[in-house]
């Protein structure tokens, strides 16, 4: 498989079990026992995915996640005994791609790793439309499907893998209204849950990242969902 996974957790037993199962599945596995060691391994070893415990000595998982997102958009799976919506929303708001609650089964963790690796690194590859379409352009936004990067002009906008998939959905059909269920199933590649807090947080983060010159890129359609504007809403309004 060739992908490199970093397990950052202060519990040696958890690291040992995850290491064993991930290695059996073909991954190269790295370990860190605290946040500072994790940061060093990330900078030196360049892992393809990070499993990040929230509560660690030195630097906690949230601070490590903030640092990761300042430099790259690799998949990050948060690992925590905290299972409240507020904790999950905080992790997602900071840029986490997935969240596993302790206690968990090692096979579940491996499945989550496989899913996030597949989502992130297979984007832009494979058959169908992606063989010929290498980028999508709407307004002044350009989404590079091969590098999984979003640009406004020459400026790069950092996206998580979930944000990338949502922007891809929007930019493939600008002007179309997508329901929360459609957005969730595209972004998280999972069944739509009862709570849609994850979507609201993600859309809010995207709007913050896209904000430029007063433009409204993502519009809320009350009672229906969201759409990406085909053209600058401000300029369009002046023409009417």
Image (cartoon, helix red, strand yellow):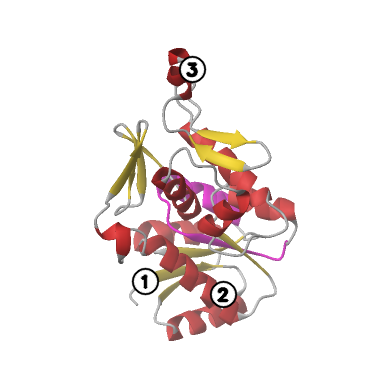
Tag on residue 3?
1
Q: Which residue is mark 2?
A: 109
Q: Nearer the viewer, mark 3 or mark 2?
A: 3
State yes or no: residue 55 in magenta. no
On screen, residue 52 above or below 134: below
**Mark 1 vs mark 3: which is more N-terminal?**
1
Left/right of residue 148 with respect to residue 59 in the rendered view: left
Q: Position of residue 203 (x, y in %)?
A: 57, 42
Q: Which residues are magenta?
A: 60-82
Q: Position of residue 225 (x, y in %)?
A: 61, 43
Residue at the image point whose x is 47% and y is 73% from the top: 114
On screen, residue 66 above or below 100: above
Q: Nearer the viewer, mark 1 or mark 3?
A: 3
**Mark 3 vs mark 2: which is more N-terminal?**
2
Q: Which residue is mark 3?
A: 237
Residue at the image point whose x is 31% and y is 63% from the top: 128
């Amino acid at each position: 498989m060739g992908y490199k996974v970093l397990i950052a957790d202060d519990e040696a037993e958890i690291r040992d079990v995850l290491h064993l199962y991930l290695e059996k599945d073909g991954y190269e596995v790295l370990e860190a026992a605290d946040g500072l060691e994790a940061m060093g391994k990330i900078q030196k070893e360049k892992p393809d995915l990070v499993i990040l415990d929230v509560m660690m000595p030195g630097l906690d998982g949230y601070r490590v996640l903030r640092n990761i997102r300042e430099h790259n958009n690799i998949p990050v799976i948060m690992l925590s005994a905290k299972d409240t919506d507020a904790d999950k929303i905080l992790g997602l708001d900071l840029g986490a791609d997935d969240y596993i609650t302790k206690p968990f089964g090692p096979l579940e963790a491996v499945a989550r790793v496989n899913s996030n690796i597949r989502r992130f690194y297979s984007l832009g590859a494979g058959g169908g439309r992606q063989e010929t379409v290498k980028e999508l352009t709407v307004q002044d936004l350009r989404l590079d499907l091969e590098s999984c990067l979003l640009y406004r002009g020459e400026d790069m906008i950092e996206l998580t893998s979930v944000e990338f998939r949502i922007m891809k959905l929007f930019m493939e059909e600008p002007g179309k209204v997508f329901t929360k269920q459609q957005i969730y199933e595209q972004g998280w590649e999972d069944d739509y849950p009862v709570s849609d807090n994850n979507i609201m947080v993600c859309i809010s983060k995207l709007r913050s990242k896209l904000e430029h010159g007063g433009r409204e890129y993502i519009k809320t359609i009350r009672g229906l969902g969201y759409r990406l504007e085909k053209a600058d809403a401000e300029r369009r309004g002046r023409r009417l």
